[in-house]
Amino acid sequence: MNRFKLNKVVGIVFTIASLLVFSSENVNAQSVRSRGMGGAFIGLSNDESATIYNPAGLSQIEGREASIQAKVNERDIYEWQSLAFTGHIYEDEEESRFSITDYLEHNILEEPIPRRPKYSYGFSYTQDKRYEGFGNIVGGDYIGVKRDVSDFQLAFATRFPIARRMLAREQLYGGLKLRVLEVDRYVRGGVNTSRDTVSMGAGLMYHYNDQLSFGLTLDNLLEHVKGKNAKEDGISFNLGAAYEIARGTVVAVDGINLSDSCDSIERQYRVGVEKRFVENDLTMRIGSLNGTLTIGFGMNVLPNVRVDYSFYDGDLITEHHVGAHMSFD
């Protein structure tokens, strides 16, 4: 099967998958870029939000990256903002001993494999506040309730080369994540409650080639929950894939909580497309987040600064998010 036919088949498969996405109340998209792609980011995870989606993805980032983002509409009923940063730990000095890998890269391969840091790290902090006005709109358990969520995540990752064949460039990345989640609920005329959770998760990312990558994450592998009537959520098993169907065009698909063992989130499927234009200065995005349309775009306003926007067309509340992404050497 030639390249054109393969791209066509993969595109059809992803299109069909997007039609199978169903609706759910629980949404866990945590960056403006990924929101525009329907939250499908586990198999891509190539910016600082990998801390949240797939910690293993931190090792594929070159340089340091940071972002600040927020929900900008109807903040009197629903407020959201987030900060994220990623960096690397490099070798103290280059090894002087002979290496077959170095010899192949410098004497046989046309383009040497870029040097990667030994370890990568990232952290993010997110605030999510839902006021009583939010409950009056969506109803259910939110009626008469104010909810305040603080979410801190710290992740570490490293890269493992795979040499199935002598000149193979397949790569495997691994990562661990620590999450501290505080949820406070204030009930009008009732008893206020809080739930504090400390959990550990893990992620893997496999690059089959320059076009196709796969991601796997396990959340709540270790978990400690404190609070009135609090119980552990259970392990969430998540899978994702990303495929560059043409230069500058990436399609991503995620399956969240496929084991259906996590109480705090229902099984979800997400699909997203990202297309880069004008020498990567403009990026358009579209996706399906649990059956709901999302769109977005990014634009480079400076060589190292990108502005992002996303729109979520919710049934009851629409959401507009903006963010600024910065990269450093």
Image (cartoon, rainbow, N blue to C red):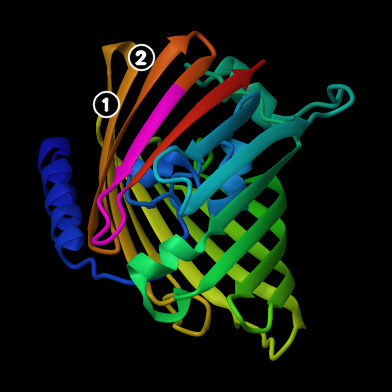
Looking at the image, which residue is at 12% across and 36% down?
4
Above or below — where is 257 with respect to 278?
Answer: below
Instruction: Estimate the x, y position of residue 179 in percent, counting from the top left.
Output: 71, 61
Q: Residue furthest bottom?
A: 229
Label 1 vs label 2, nearer the camera: 2
User: Sequence-wise, which precedes: disc 1 or disc 2?
Assistant: 1
Residue 169 visible:
no
Looking at the image, residue 267 sits to the left or right of residue 169; the answer is left
Instruction: Decide: few, some or many residues near mark 1? Use Cα within 10 Å; few <14, some 14-19, many ≥20.
Output: few
* Front in this rendered view, residue 108 or 223: 223
Residue drawn at x 72%, y 72% as measured from the top left: 197
Q: Which portion, as a residue range, is magenta? A: 307-318
- Mark 1: which secondary structure? loop
Q: Amino acid at mark 1?
A: Arg
Other-residue count near label 2 (Cα within 10 Å), few / some / many at <14 / 14–19 / ≥20:
some
User: Is residue 127 part of the magenta span, yes or no?
Assistant: no
* Amino acid type for the residue under numbered disc 2: Asp
Image coordinates of residue 246 in percent, x first then y, are 22, 31
Closer to us: 267 or 103: 267
Q: Based on the displayed image, in which of its 4 quarters is residue 25 positioned?
A: bottom left
Q: Which numbered circle lies on residue 98?
A: none
